[in-house]
Amino acid sequence: MNIRIHNTLSGKKELLQPIEEGHVKLYVCGITSYDYCHIGHARSSLAFDMVVRYLRYRGLKVTFVRNFTDIDDKIIARANEQGTSAEELANRFIEEFYTDMDALGVDRPDIEPKATEHIPEMIALIEELVRQDKAYPSGGDVYYVVDSFPEYGKLSGRNIEDMKAGARIAVNEQKRHPMDFVLWKSSKPGEPKWDSPWGPGRPGWHIECSAMSKKYLGETFDIHGGGQDLIFPHHENEIAQSEGANGKKFVNMWIHHGFVTIRDEKMSKSLGNFLTIRDILNNYHPEILRFFIFSTHYRNPLDFSESAMQDATSGLERLYECVAAIDELNEQDTTDHSPSILTDKDGAKLGQLESRFQQAMDNDFNTAQAQGVFFDTVKTLNRIRRQLGVSPSSSDIATLKKSVATLRNLAGIMGLLTEDAKTFLAKRKQEMVAACDIDVETIESLINERIQCRKEKNWARSDEIRDELLAKNIELKDGPDGTTWVVRTT
RNA sequence: GGCGGCGUAGCCAAGUGGCUAAGGCAGUGGUCUGCAAAACCAUUAUUCAUCGGUUCGACUCCGAUCGCCGCCUCCA
C-alpha cells in the first residue's frame, strides 16, 4: 500500500505510515454548535467521510474522533440573544447538525466527544503545563507561555516576532507576552462555569482538542484534520499545548481542506453570501452536492454557483444513466454462442477501473481524478452497450454488470451511486416535472397523439406537438422502442 | 507588513521531470432520425500567467515579475 497524503507540517506529500500497523488514528475538529451548518461545514464533513471510507476500503482500521465544541463565547452570546442557556443552545444545534449529516449520508465518527464532558481532562492538562512553568495563572485566567515552546509557529510557518509585528493582536494586561493564549478563562457573573484550581471558569478553545485527542487516541497519533483556517491559531496552539505537556510529538500528519467560496469570495454573514446545508438540500439531491464537492481536490478552493451545481447534476445523471441502462440488460436474452464484441482495449480499460481509481485516491485523495476515471469507464461501457446485438454474448453482459458493480462500489466511497439508478432518475424526473407547467397525463396524451400523426406522416402536427412540449421544457426522444421524454435542464 | 496557496482550452478541472497535457460542461463534424433530440463516434491547448535558470529533457524543480485568493481576530 502506498497512500500519500499532503502534510501541512512539512508542506509535502508523505507516505501514510500508521504508528500502529494497519490502524489509523484520526482526529478532526468538529463544529462549534451555535448555528445551522453551512456548505463549508458540509465540505469538511464530506471530505473526512471520504477519507475514512477510503482508508477502510484499503483495508486499514480507522479510529475516527470528531469533537463538538459546545461551550465558547459565541455560544454564550447567542444563548443570551435567544434567552436560553448555552447548554440548551449547543445541544439543539448538535441535533440540527445530525439532521444535516444524516441528510448528506455522512457516517458517524467512532467517538464524538463534547468539550463540556471533558473538563477534568482539560484541567489536568493545564495543571501539568502550570507545573512545568509552561503556563501561568493571571487574574483568574490561565495563559500558555509561548516562549516556552521554541517550535511555536512550525505548523503555520511563522515566528513569534513576525506575528508581534503584525500588531493585530489586542493588548491584554493579563498576559506576559502578547502571543500567550488562554487555556482557562474566568467566568463573568451569569456565565456557565466549572470549578478549577484557578477559580470558577471555562476552558479556552484550543485545550479541548489537546485533552480529548489524548484521551481517545493517545499522546501521539497519526492524522489531525480540519479546515485551512484552523491552521493558525487553533492547531498551532494545540501543538504547543500537547507537545509542551507531554514532551512528545503530537501528530504525524496534518490534513487541511480548502474553503467553499461564493462568487470567489469566502462565505460570511456580513457579505450575505451564506448558504446553509439545508438551503442547498432544498434544491439539490445530496449526491449532487457530494459530486460537486468531490469534483475538485480537497485542498483547493471550491466556488459554489448555480451553474456549477448544474454541471454536477449533468455529470451525476450521466453516471446514473449508464448504470440504469446496464441494470436493464436482461441476462436471459444472451447466448453463449455469440462471440464477444469486447476489444482487448475495452477489456483492459474496464479491468483497470479499480487500479486507476486507487492510483488517483492513493495520491492524496484525488477525487477529481477518480471521477475522471469513472467517466472514462462510463464512456467505454456506453460504447459497448450500444454495440450489443439482439442476442449478445453472455460473457459481455457479465463483464458490463461486473464493471457497474465495481463502479458503484468505488463511487460509494464518495457517497455516489448509492441509490437504485432507475429510481434515482425517475425521482429526478418527477421532481422536475413538478416544476414544469404541465402534468404527466397531458404529456403522455400528446405523445400518443404524436405517435398517431407520425404513423400518418403528418409531420407538421407532429413537430407542432414536439415544439409545444419543448416550450414547457419537455424534450422528446424518438428511439427504436418508441418515444420517451425528459425534462430539459437549462 | 509577515506567512501560505493559486494562475492549464470558452467554462470547470486532473497532471507523482521523459511515452498521446485525464475527465466533465459547452462547441463543431459524422452515425442514427421524416426532421430533430438523446446516445454513440470523431474532433477542439505545438501549449500549461510572463521572463529567466537548472537539466540531455520541465506544466512538473529554482529565481524574479504580474495577477488573484486565504491566514495573521471568531471561522470549515
Image: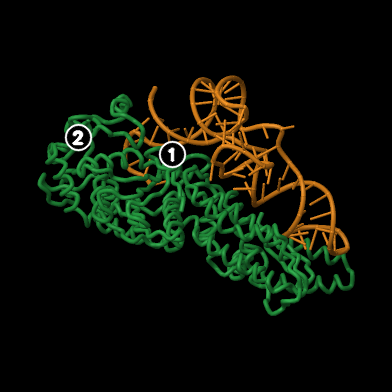
Chain colours: A green, B orange
Q: Is residue A353 above or below residue A262?
A: below
Q: Is residue A129 visible?
A: yes
Quadrant including the C terminus of chain A: bottom right
- The picture places residue A204, in percent across and down from the top left corner, at 23, 44
Residue A328 on image: x %, y %: 66, 73
Under circle 1, the secondary element is strand
Question: Tag 1, which chain?
Answer: A
Residue at figure coordinates x 53%, y 64% from the top left: A409
Badge 2: few (under 14), some or many (20 or more) residues near its Cα, within 10 Å? many
Q: Position of residue B72 (x, y in %)?
A: 34, 33
Residue A100: quadrant of the picture: bottom left
Q: Amino acid at mark 2?
A: Val
Residue A221 spot, x, y in % from top left: 31, 50
Nearest to N terminus: mark 1 or mark 2: 1
Q: Residue at x 25, y 57 (%)?
A: A87
For the residues beneath circles 1 and 2, the answer to whether they share a chain is yes
Residue A31 seen by the camera: no
Position of A286 relative to B22 (above/below):
below
Residue A222, numbered label: none
Q: Kindly report the distance in space between the C-alpha atoms of the residues bearing marks 1 and 2.
A: 30 Å
**Residue occupying image coordinates x 85% and y 71%:** A453
Direction from residue B59 to residue A10 in the image, left or right: left
- For mark 1, what is the residue? A12
Q: Which residue is mark 2?
A: A145
Q: Amino acid at mark 1?
A: Lys
Q: Residue furthest bottom?
A: A332
